[in-house]
Amino acid sequence: AQKVTQAQTEISVVEKEDVTLDCVYETRDTTYYLFWYKQPPSGELVFLIRRNSFDEQNEISGRYSWNFQKSTSSFNFTITASQVVDSAVYFCALSEGGDSSYKLIFGSGTRLLVRP
Amino acid sequence: DSGVTQTPKHLITATGQRVTLRCSPRSGDLSVYWYQQSLDQGLQFLIQYYNGEERAKGNILERFSAQQFPDLHSELNLSSLELGDSALYFCASSVVSGNPVHEQYFGPGTRLTVT
């Protein structure tokens, strides 16, 4: 069965620290898609990144980077030099290629608090 | 701004009542998804419409229903409301429903409080 696990419920760091948010997924499909979304205190869900199962290249976007490892079924998210504005709940999500709806299966989220 | 709009932003109603949540997808997006976010269940998929037709159902209660209109906006109808229906309801849209999968863009959500 498909599942996304974000074991870290809450992380607190001091500004400028690096922080990694963990995501472990389970799926039987060979084609699948992984996502990260950010939910700031205002409540909306903001898309950050999509990664396809056949593309294991890591990605960097500014202070954000993502490490996709199929061997460990993980898709971790690192924020370098964290800032107060990074404080939010971050969700990892899975979409399976064998599911024609391509609905998102979300993890339980990790609340990140960046203290000044 | 994701381009997905949802109304109303907040809704307070009593148990047993019926409400309608509205969603307008991004221009050009054919697929609309509804999700529910609650403290105990997290973010859960409810239902998907693609170009006017129901495509998939998730953990949606029988008291809930949805539709997508010819102009592609969608409505989620919640009836016989219970206290446990209090949640944040999100609508999301994507370009197509197919391979390759495109990301879903979420609206700001409707916060429903049932008293």
Image (tube, helix red, strand yellow):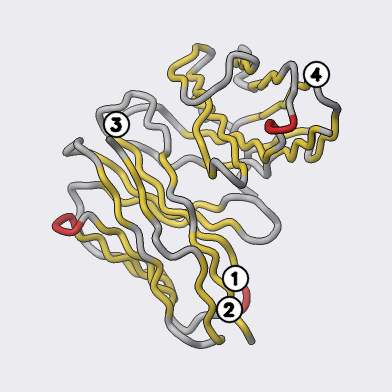
At x 30% / y 59%, what residue is drawn?
A: A75
User: Residue A36 at what x, y percent from top left?
Assistant: 43, 55
- Of all chains, the one bearing label 3 is B
Q: Distance from label 1 to label 2 (Cα)?
A: 5 Å
At x 64% / y 21%, what residue is drawn?
A: B74
Residue B16, label in figure: 4
Query: Looking at the picture, do discs 2 and 3 lie on one chain?
Result: no
Q: Nearer the viewer, mark 3 or mark 1?
A: 1
The secondary element bearing badge 4 is classed as loop
Please identify the quarter of the rendering in which residue A76 is found: bottom left
At x 58% / y 78%, what residue is drawn?
A: A114
Please identify the quarter of the rendering in which residue A7 is found: bottom left
The secondary element bearing badge 3 is classed as loop
Reading the image, the residue beneath label 1 is: A87
Reading the image, the residue beneath label 2 is: A114
Q: Nearer the viewer, mark 4 or mark 2?
A: 4
The secondary element bearing badge 1 is classed as loop
The secondary element bearing badge 2 is classed as strand
Q: Residues within 10 Å of mark 2 (few under 14, many from 20)?
A: many
- Of all chains, the one bearing label 1 is A
Please identify the quarter of the rendering in which residue B27 is found: top right
Q: Residues within 10 Å of mark 4 (few under 14, many from 20)?
A: few
Q: Report the side of B5 relative to A28 (left or right).
A: right
Count of numbered labels shown in the rendering: 4
Q: Report the side of B1 relative to A79 (left or right).
A: right
Reading the image, the residue beneath label 3 is: B99
At x 55% / y 60%, what residue is drawn?
A: A89
Q: Distance from label 3 to label 1 (Cα)?
A: 33 Å
Q: Distance from label 4 to label 1 (Cα)?
A: 37 Å
Going by the numbered disc 2, the residue's amino acid type is: Val
Q: Distance from label 4 to label 3 (Cα)?
A: 41 Å
